[in-house]
Structures are given as structure tokens and as C-alpha cells.
Amino acid sequence: MSWLTSAVTVVAALGTAVLRAIGSESWRPALAVTLAVFGVRVAVMAWGASRRELPWSRLLLPGIIWLEGAGLATSSAATLWQVRLGTAVMLELGFVVVAIREVRRVSASNEPVDDRLARAFGALLPPGAARFVAFELVIIGSALRFVIGGWRRAVPAGFTYHRESVLRLFLQFLPILGVADLLLVELVLLPHAATWLRLVVHGLAIYGLVWLVGFYASLRGRPHQLANGRLILHRGMLRRSPCP
């Protein structure tokens, strides 16, 4: 039932987005159907929470999404709109409070930071989504630390292949590649495309460069190590394999 409601919700949401993008007036009825299906999905989650199959905090984000969708689907009166806004704000504050609490709760652990964040976000998101968000946040954080001076820091004790990595050579040409990518998209690939499409393409390109910097930083900061008689092998952020 859980997988069925999830699949139907995704299909309905994609259909609504397509109708909205092409300017069809049918997008509002489609959004109402999507909200109804999503409401069933939230009810299934609430049933699971009542049976202690998942934490109640997992209902916060779906509740926020449902309320925001309801605001798009209806032209509510001012009083009703204020009630909806107040409820959404309370749910969002609850989401932030739970996230901070869970991150603090696991901060004392010796696990890698992405594992700790994934465990913390597991109180708010499905396991796969929690792992993905934690991974991307750590990649972005690693890139920012590397750019603002982390490249000067000594490499942790252990053995790493970062010096022989092709990425090390690639990073030296990032400024040139960034300018070339901008010119290629604007003058050759999408010279007459809509502004939003060009912004999306440039955003994805910039994020790709940030991701490469972050991955290289993780190669540098996570060497193979021998600790307490146990060998821990790393492949940057991609893999961690303890060997007894």
C-alpha cells in the first residue's frame, strides 16, 4: 500500500507539473487529484507512525507540502489563508527544531559526518532520501572548505590516491572550463532558449563543478587508515569499507 500510494502520488504530481508548464487550465483539477492522493499517502504514513513503524516526525515534511499545495489549489479567504500560513510556519519550525535536535544527538559519534547526518535526517525523511541529502550536503561543505583555504591543510595520516587523481589536474583548469561552458551554452547550444532554461542549465553546470571539487576534497580528507588494528578503506565519499 505504501509503495502504491507513493507511485500514484509521483505520477499525479508529474502530470500536474506538465499541465501547468504547457499552460493548460486543467492543472488545477489535476492538482486537486494529486492532493487527494497525497492525503491518502499521509494517512498511510500516520497509520504506520501509530504502529511505531516510523517516527511521527516523518509526517512534518509531507504536511508542509500538502498545505502549500492546498494553497495553490484554492483561492481561500483571507482568514483561511492566515490559518493555513500559520499552520505551515509551525510545521516548518517543527521540522527545523527536529533536524537540529537529531543532528546534535548524533554529533558525539565517531562515525563519518555523512553517516551521522543521514541518521539524523532519518527522523524526517525516508532512509534513501536522508542518505542522499546528507551526502550532497557534505559534498558541498567539503567543496566550500576546500576553496576557502582547506587546500592548505595537511592531509590526514594514512594513504590516499588524491595526488595521482586526474581530478587534481582538472581542478587547475576549472576557471577556463567555467568560462568555456558559459560561452558554449549562450552562443552555441541555447542562444534563443527561454531565460529559465538557460539558468537551469548554468545552475546544473555550476553544481557539477562544485561536486567535483567536493569529491576531490573528500579523496584528500579520507585516506586509507589503520586504526586500532583495523584497516578502513575509503574511496572519497563514495565508499567506506572497514576490514577486520
Image (tube, grey):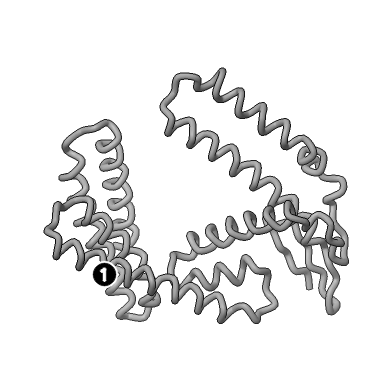
Q: Residue at x 37, y 68 (%)?
A: 92
Q: Residue at x 56, y 81 (%)?
A: 105
Which quarter of the rendering shows the C terminus? Answer: bottom right
Amino acid type of disc 1? Thr
The image quadrant that residue 71 belongs to is bottom left
Q: Is 49 in front, or is 96?
A: 96
Residue 1 in the figure: left or right of residue 54: left
Q: Residue at x 32, y 80 (%)?
A: 51
Which quarter of the rendering shows the N terminus? Answer: bottom left
Q: Is 44 in front, or is 145?
A: 145
Residue identified by numbered label 1 = 87
Residue 117 in the figure: left or right of residue 78: right
Is 84 above or below relative to 108?
above
Where residue 164 appears, as percent x and y from the top left, is 87, 45
Where residue 208 appears, as percent x and y from the top left, is 61, 42
Where residue 56 appears, as percent x and y from the top left, is 36, 77
Q: Residue at x 65, y 46 (%)?
A: 210
Q: Residue furthest left?
A: 77
Q: Secondary structure at mark 1?
A: helix
Dot 1: few (<14), some (14–19), or many (≥20) neighbours within 10 Å? some
Residue 164 in the figure: left or right of residue 213: right
The mark tally for this picture is 1
Residue 42 in the figure: left or right of residue 57: left
Where residue 75 appears, as percent x and y from the top left, is 14, 52
The image quadrant that residue 21 belongs to is top left
